[in-house]
Structures are given as structure tokens and as C-alpha cells.
Amino acid sequence: MSNNQQYDFDVTILGGGLVGATLALALHQQGKKVLLLEKKPPQTSLSILSQSWDARIYAVSPANQQFLSKLDVWPAERVQAVSSMQVFGDDHGYISFEASSVKVPCLNYMLENRYLLAKIWLALAENGVMVAESRPRSVKTDIWSAQITLENNESYRSQLLVGADGANSWLREQVGIEVIASPYQQQAIVANFSIAEPHQGCAYQWFRGGDILAYLPLPQQQISIVWSTANAEKLTMLAEKDFAWQVAQAGQFKLGELTSTTPMFTFDLIKRQPKTVISQRVALIGDAAHTVHPLAGQGVNLGFADVQCLSNLLAQTSDIGSWSLLRQYQRSRLLAVRMMQHGCDGLFRLFANDDLPGIGWLRNQGLNLVDCSWMIKNRLIRQAMGL
Ligand SMILES: Cc1cc2nc3c(=O)[nH]c(=O)nc-3n(C[C@H](O)[C@H](O)[C@H](O)COP(=O)(O)OP(=O)(O)OC[C@H]3O[C@@H](n4cnc5c(N)ncnc54)[C@H](O)[C@@H]3O)c2cc1C
């Protein structure tokens, strides 16, 4: 059998969130012919975005910061470097991490989802990457290609179709990939606050029984919080001022009184493990390929690592989307993704579980023990930094 098909694109990417848009840019810079499909292109006016703050804040690892800088999309402004982190257990357990202990300038960088996304979309426009504002209607694949038909009946054939269409991926469902979804029976509340005491680049996290609260430093004397809890409804019904007080109290008034600067948003927390992340001429990346508990702030970092892995593999081959390349992609990402999912899961369950006698004491002693071991601590820091 020979391949006498004409391709419209080398790669079509469905979903222009942070992960899909970054892959589109990386592949375009390799000289690939790319189409990016997005149903709802983002706001790209930096002056409009600079008038307020996004409550969706990410901790981006230094490894991914370097990757985004190479693509020339890393913002020079509205970014906060995190130089230390303090973690509190629910019974005197404590561990701290300092960037200086591994001789690096910072542990990670905090920045807004929408500002980084705008930078990437501006770069897509400057580079002339083809973007279609549309949803797909159907998809067909054969051993040589994937064909996607849009709602307006336009049809495009490419060597590889990438699903970057988020946690509830349409493409994943269309190609029949089953997903094991394990809900945490919790929601995450996110919101930003101005603070009374300076954060000095320190992030804080409290394990409070099943609840996990994080204070993430932002520029301009602000923090973003992520509060994972089974009682989100009760908290989100509070008046803004009362909620701010609850957050300050749960955080032991570490940064003094808090004042809300954004509305709060909630997300359902679900671990998703698709049975595979590849199918004939199809690869999944980002949240379409995995979701994790946000306690380690690693969701989008895993997605950027998918992008680096897939784009590196594609740079080395002319048969874009061949089965052997797709299998190599799947194999390369499986271990890192599973380790992160199981690590977050284990930590969550350790602190959510009070059924076993002595477990509360044990987990807090565990934190204290690790705090005393610089070797384990440094290893944990390097792993979280993607080094
Ligand atoms: C509370 C919370 C806090 C988090 N904090 C962090 C953190 O600190 N650090 C971190 O690394 N991660 C964090 N994450 C995870 C992070 O939000 C996700 O991992 C990341 O946004 C995934 O990016 P993505 O591009 O894969 O998917 P998405 O951001 O979901 O993008 C998918 C895109 O596809 C488009 N799309 C979907 N379906 C279609 C369709 N049919 N047709 C056309 N377009 C379509 C959507 O419009 C969207 O633009 C957090 C998550 C939560 C819930």
C-alpha cells in the first residue's frame, strides 16, 4: 500500500488553551504546517488584561519557564518568583523549602493563566500560524491521516491530529478512548486577595484534615489562594468580607488581614486517567491526557512537558504521526504523569484519612522528619522544579 494522499496540514491541534497553543507555536517554529482549532479564542489585549487580575494563577516550573522563554512568550511583567515554601500539617507537622538550599534563584513562578495565554496567542498571530475559530463536527482516521470536519462543513486532512481540548476532551471521546475518572469529592475555590503583611516571595500550604489551603504569592502585595474542600458551597455562599476572614483565619493570619480583589471561582477536583493517550494518527496532550489534584500545582506543568516531548519527537521524523512515533510519545510520558498523579493522590489521602489509629501523628511526624533531611528535601525541590 502506498500513501498518495494530499495533506492540508502536517498537524491539526484541537484546543487553544495554554497547552495546545504552545504546541502550535513550537511546531510552527520547527517549520511544520499547523492548524489550531479553538471554539473561543482568548482576549489578547494586554492593556485590557492589565486592568485587573485573573484568579486562575499557575505555578510554572523553572524548566517550563525556560521552554516558554525560548518560544519568546514568557512575560517580563506580572510574574512573581517563589523563593521559599512553608507547609503545615494538621498536628504540628511542618516542612519548608528554600530555593537557596539548591542554589537556584527560585522554586517556581506564579503567573496568570489569561496573561500567559494572551502572550502565546499574540505570538501565534505574529508568526502567522493558521487559526480557525470553530468546533469540530466529526473525525475520521486511516493509517496515513486524520480528517476533521468542522461545524461549517470545512474539512481538513493532516498527518497528525492532537487533542488539547481539555479535561472533557471531545476528541478523546470520538476516538473511543476510555477514561478512569476518580472524583476527590472536593472542589477547589480560587480567588485573589491583597495582603496586610508582605509575602516576601513565600508560598504557604496548610493540610487541614481533608482540606488543603494554599497561599500563592503574586506581585503588588497580593496572593492567590486555592482552597480544596468538601465544603465549598458553604464557603462560596459567604459575603466577600466574611470569606476573606475565613481564608485569613484558616491561614493562621500569616499575612495579616486579607481583602478580596477578585470574585471566587470553583472547580470540581477529579483525577482522570485515559486508558491510552494515543490512537491512529491521534495524540492527546494536557488535561485531555491527564488531570491531577492541584495540591502540587503541577497540572499545566505536565501539559507543557507533553508539548516538549511531542515536539522533540516530531522534530526528528518525517513521518509525523506514525504509530511508532505515537507509541514513543506515550511511553515517554507515562511514568512522569503516573508518578505525579499517584504522588498527589497519596498525599491527599494521607491527610484526608483519619480511620487508622495513629495516622494523624504519623503523617505530621513524617513531615517533620523530611524537614530534617536536606537530601530528601533537595530531591523533592529538584523534582518539582522539573530538573
Ligand atoms: C483550582 C485549580 C488550580 C490549578 N492550579 C494549577 C497550578 O498552580 N499549576 C499548574 O500547573 N496547573 C494548575 N491547574 C491545572 C491547569 O488549570 C490545567 O492543567 C491546564 O489549564 C490545562 O491546560 P489545557 O490547555 O490542557 O486545557 P484547557 O485550559 O482546558 O484548554 C482547552 C481548550 O480547548 C478548547 N476546546 C475544548 N473543546 C473544544 C472543541 N470541541 N472545539 C474547539 N475548542 C475546544 C477550550 O475552549 C480551551 O481553550 C489547576 C487546576 C485547577 C482546577
Image (tube, helix red, strand yellow):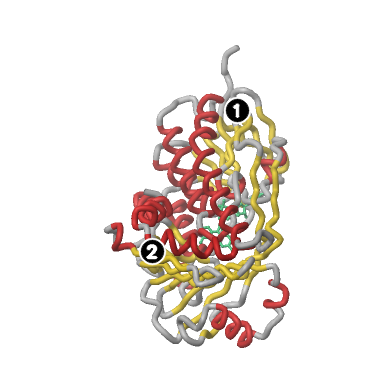
Residues at badges 1 and 2 in contact (C-beta under 8 Å)?
no
The residue that mark 2 highlights is 97
Dot 2: within a 10 Å radius of its alpha carbon, few (fewer than 14), some, or many (20 or more) residues?
A: many
Q: In front: 96, or 241?
A: 96
- Return the x and y of residue 352 as percentages of the image width and height: 64, 62
Q: Secondary structure at mark 2?
A: strand
Q: Is residue 140 above or below residue 86?
A: above
Name the disc covering residue 145, or none. Answer: 1
Nearer the N terminus, badge 1 or badge 2? 2
Name the residue at the front extreme. 357
Residue at the image point whose x is 68% and y is 77% from the top:
236
Which corner quadrant of the figure contains ligand 1? bottom right
- Return the x and y of residue 232 as percentages of the image width and height: 69, 72
Residue at the image point whose x is 54% and y is 29% from the top:
327
- Return the x and y of residue 99 as percentages of the image width and height: 33, 62
Q: In front: 299, or 336?
A: 336
Name the residue at the left extreme. 103
Q: Is residue 72 visible?
A: no
Residue at the image point whose x is 45% and y is 82% from the top:
255
